[in-house]
Image: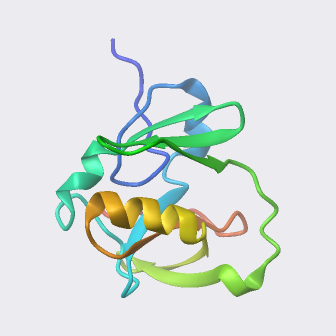
Amino acid sequence: MSAPAFQPVAECGETSQAQAEAYHRRWLVSNDAGTWLTRALCPRLAEVAVELRMGYLVMKAPGMLRMDIPLDVIEDDDSVRYQIRIGEQVVDVVDEGDLAAAWLSNFLQLPCRLLKVHPDMAAVHWPA
């Protein structure tokens, strides 16, 4: 029986780390038009490896230095809070900033942002 796999960043690499269950699909990538990026729209997302280490989401990709994002931050800055459509649902998200955006944009070769589902958001219904 194989270990369960979790995707802390929707559509990116998977991890079987037990602690990742609490962070399954907590983050997502959107383009600069606010569209959630799936592997169908951006196949290179599958090349982004993800793991949790010492309180950080650690992202790695071929040819890139690793990027560490703090897992649990108090989301009290409404200037970086947005809404995005995921399937038929409008989801509150928090932008993880310009460094994460530059890292992803550089690797994916298109302008994009790393967004975190706001912790006050009810369950997200991810399309199949």
Q: On screen, 94 above or below 2? A: below
Residue at image point 52% right, 62% down: 100
Count the labels in the image: 0
Q: Residue 32 location in percent, x, y?
A: 38, 83
Q: Nearer the viewer, residue 87 or 56?
A: 56
Residue at image point 33% right, 11% down: 1
Report whether 110 appears left or right of 83.
left
Q: Residue 68 location in percent, x, y?
A: 59, 45
Residue 128 visible, this orientation: no
Report whether 13 appears left or right of 120.
left
Residue at image point 55% right, 55% down: 26
Residue 84 visible, this orientation: yes
Q: On screen, 10 above or below 86? A: above
Furthest residue to the top? Answer: 1
Q: Residue 63 location in percent, x, y?
A: 31, 43
Q: Residue 95 location in percent, x, y?
A: 59, 73
Residue at image point 35% right, 75% down: 87
